[in-house]
Amino acid sequence: MAAPVFLGDQVSAAGYRLGGAVVRTPCPGEEVSLFEWACRMAPLVLVTAEVAAHLPHALLARAFAAGQPLVLIVPDVRGRATPPDLATVLRRQLGMET
């Protein structure tokens, strides 16, 4: 599969589907298995912050560290959950902000 995979809510998924992504809207409890499937199948995995909140931190950390596929956490169209501000996180880690 060469198309990106989007994991998130149905409303956000509609836009990604129009853009050519394969979309999945996980039911409660399916988040981990669908994320693992997406990582095996696609060169790019887009996950809403809401779905990412249901994934184990260690699983996300391994996916980010692997670099293949590229995994991105994106906001959902309704703004119910937003991804962390990476600039703020980085400044905190460097001790530049508390």
Image (cartoon, rainbow, N blue to C red):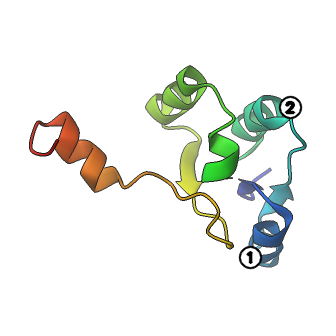
Q: Residue furthest top?
A: 58
Residue at image point 21% right, 35% down: 93
Identify the image quadrant of residue 22. Answer: bottom right
Q: As drawn, is 17 to the left or to the right of 66?
A: right
Q: Residue furthest left?
A: 96
Nearer to us: label 1 or label 2: 2
> How many labels sit on residues?
2
Can you say whether 7 is above or below 19 in the image? above
What residue is disc 1 on?
19
Q: Position of residue 52 (x, y in %)?
A: 63, 42
Q: Quadrant of the C terminus?
A: top left
Can you say whether 45 is above or below 17 in the image? above
For label 1, the SS is loop
Q: Position of residue 27 (x, y in %)?
A: 90, 43
Instruction: Tell me how far mark 1 sits from mark 2, CA to CA.
Output: 27 Å
Q: As drawn, is 59 to the left or to the right of 15?
A: left
Say which label, 1 or 2, has the lower sequence index. 1
Residue at image point 75% right, 70% down: 16
Q: Position of residue 43 (x, y in %)?
A: 64, 48
Task: Report crowding for label 1: few under 14, some 14 to 19, many 20 or more residues within 10 A (C-alpha).
Answer: few
Q: Residue furthest right?
A: 27
Asked whether the residues under the numbered discs 1 and 2 touch, taking CB atoms below 8 Å apart as contact, a structural biologist would say no
Is residue 45 in view from this perspective?
no
Q: Position of residue 40 (x, y in %)?
A: 74, 34
What residue is disc 2 on?
29
Amino acid residing under circle 2: Gly
Amino acid residing under circle 1: Gly
